[in-house]
Image (cartoon, rainbow, N blue to C red):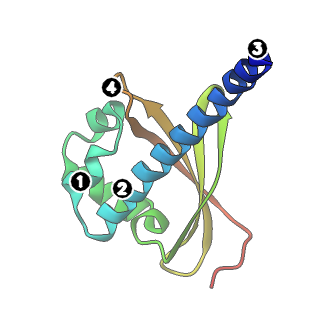
Amino acid sequence: MRLVLALLLLLSLPAYAETKDEAAIQDVISQQLDAFRHDDAEAAFTFASPGIQAIFVAPGFFLGMVAHAYPPVYRPQQVAFGALVSEGGVPVQKVELIGPDGSAWTALYSMEKQPDGTWKIAACRLVESHAVGS
C-alpha cells in the first residue's frame, strides 16, 4: 500500500512542476504586458531573454519596436491565456489578444528558463485569429 502511495506521489510531481512553470510563465508575460501598458521600457525589457536584450541593447529601442511591430501586444484591449505547449522542446505559451483596433490575434510566446530558474520571453510571434473581437 505504501509503495502504491509513493508511486502515485511520484507520478503527480511532473504535473505539479508543469503547473508551477505555467503559472510562472503566465506571470512573466502578464508583468511585461502591464509594463507595456504603462510605457515602462525598463520593466518590460527585464522580462526579455538575454538574447533579445543583446539584439535591442536599450530598453527604449525594445519598447519602440514592440509599439511599432506588435500593437496587439503593446496595447491589448483583452488578454486571455491559452494552452502552454511544447514546440521542439521549447515551451510556448499561447495568449489570445484583442488588439487596439478590435482585431483578434494569438501571440505565441517562446519561453526560456534561465540558470537561476526564472523564465524570460525569448520570442513572440503573432498570428491573426479568426475569433471575433469585442
Residue position marked by numbered label 3 in the rendering? 3
Q: Is residue 61 left or right of residue 22?
A: left
Quadrant for the N terminus, please: top right
Please name the residue that numbered disc 4 is placed on: 116
Instruction: Find the residue positioned furthest to the front.
Output: 1
Tell which tag, 1 or 4, sits nearer the viewer.
4
Residue type of the residue flagged with mark 2: Gln
Q: Quadrant of residue 134?
A: bottom right
How dense is the environment of label 1, judged by Cα within 10 Å: few (below 14), some, or many (20 and up)? some
Residue carrying label 1: 43
Q: Which residue type does callout 3 highlight?
A: Leu
Badge 3 crowding class, 10 Å Cα cut-off, few under 14, some 14 to 19, many 20 or more, is few
Q: Which label lies toward us, 2 or 4? A: 4
Q: Residues within 10 Å of mark 4 (few under 14, many from 20)?
A: few
- Mark 3 or mark 4: whose residue is earlier in sequence: 3
Identify the amino acid type marked 4: Asp
Q: Position of residue 13 (x, y in %)?
A: 63, 28
The residue sitting at 42% across, 58% down in the picture is 30
Farthest residue toward the top?
A: 3
Q: Marks 3/2: CA distance?
A: 44 Å
Q: Earlier in the sequence, mark 1 or mark 2?
A: 2
Are circles 1 and 4 on residues that touch, CB within 8 Å? Answer: no
- Mark 1–mark 2 CB contact (< 8 Å): yes
Please name the amino acid that badge 1 sits on.
Ala
Pick the front one: 105 or 31: 31
Task: Determine the residue positioned at 28% across, 59% down.
Answer: 64
